[in-house]
Image (spheres, rainbow, N blue to C red):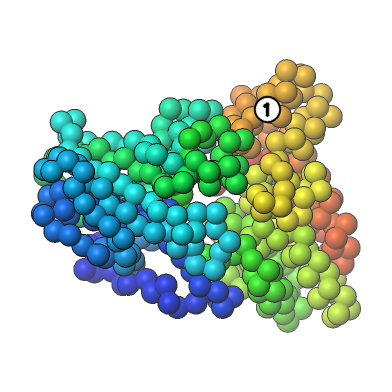
Amino acid sequence: MSLAERQPFDLNVLALNGLRRGRTTGSCATAAVKAALRLLLQGVHLSKVDIGLPDGAHYLSVPVQAVEWMEPGQTVRAEVIKDGGDDPDNTHGATIFAEVRRNDAGEVRFFAGRGVGTATLPGLRVAVGEPAINPVPRKMMRQAVQDVAGESGQGFDLTIGCEGGEVIATRTFNPRLGIVGGISILGTSGIVEPMSLATWIASVEVYIRVALAGGQQCVAYLPGKIGREFAADVLQLPEKRTVQIANFLGDALDFTEQVLVEERRTLDVLWLAGHPGKLAKVLDGWWDTHSSKSKMAMGGVARVAAEMGYAPAMVQQIENANTVEAAMDILRQEPGAPAFWREIEQRIAALARGRVPSARRIEVRLFDLAGNLLGEHQ
């Protein structure tokens, strides 16, 4: 769908929790690329550009701080200020820049500029040696190139950077993930939803009360988007019976028990569905799964592997993996991998049950980033 056919996404409309949304680093980089291309190819200096969002239905208007020639006729640099809205975002206020030039390869190529990291370990969304620019932002930038250059077949080198990104990255998991040199360019929707705030915790309670209203006996809690299809298609739960709890698993369970006690009733089944990178953190006692409040999940996963008799060398590999996705890759060829993840699910469920004794049953389902079920089930 062309931009002309899309609807504007208005960041002035507050999120459901009353907080202001923002734009991702991916959206900022895309806007910078588009502004640079407009000057490079059309000689136009813009103070604002419209970019398509990944949902295919909306566009976002993004202010451009600066756009200028670095090499006349050859290379253009454009800058966009990151606005994280009311989310406590490490990159809020940072300058995201794009340096754009033609190439003879006839394709769009991505490079890490100053302040953007490079992947050095497997298990990430990008290959080793590639700039830490995730797949959705890359797709957005390719679309921006097409919006400006059309189907001309021209190639462009896109160097994406962040002023001060080397310092900002030290406040993130990037060093532990094996991303060196700076931040990652992220975003699956192009929009920052203000989820990681105390105010959002209060909103989670409201959503849980709505989900449980009317004596409902089956609800599902999702840390993120992974698991949404499972809740809708397999469990066939309407949207109001599912709650996106973000990083606040412990609070969500406590709110659930509070409601059930208030109403003097029990709950037949509570489903927890999502990625083990979040849910498996409870194996080490982390109930607020935000990266600033918890350690990564590989230690707990490795401990379970040791207790299940996996070879010490494999246990060490899992513990030293830079992400849970990398741990999944290590286990993928093991014939007992589905049973292993089922054990992880059962342990998470048992721990969660301790916080919600009024739930008769808690079921956990873990999925990889592609939405594939990890455990084995009858």
Q: Nearer the viewer, residue 281 or 88?
A: 88
**Residue 280 image point, x, y percent:** 72, 45
Q: Is residue 56 visible?
A: no
Say what amino acid the circle numbered 1 marks. Asn
Residue drawn at x 84%, y 57% as measured from the top left = 353
Q: Nearer the viewer, residue 363 or 201?
A: 201
Please name the residue that numbered disc 1 is placed on: 320
Above-or-below relation of 91 to 302: below
Q: Nearer the viewer, residue 156 or 89?
A: 89
Left or right position of 256 against 146:
right
Left or right position of 204 against 329:
right
**Residue 195 image point, x, y percent:** 59, 64
The quadrant the C terminus occupies is top right
The quarter holding residue 89 reads bottom right
Q: Is residue 321 visible?
A: yes
Residue drawn at x 62%, y 62% as measured from the top left = 196
Above-or-below relation of 247 to 8: above
Q: Is the residue marked by circle 1 packed among few (<14), some (14-19), or many (20+) residues within 10 Å?
A: some
Q: Nearer the viewer, residue 313 or 269?
A: 313
Left or right position of 98 against 347:
left
**Residue 306 image point, x, y percent:** 81, 27
Residue drawn at x 21%, y 43% as measured from the top left = 70
Residue drawn at x 75%, y 62% as measured from the top left = 270
Which SS class for mark 1?
helix
The quarter holding residue 295 reads top right
**Residue 132 image point, x, y percent:** 44, 39
Left or right position of 214 against 332:
right
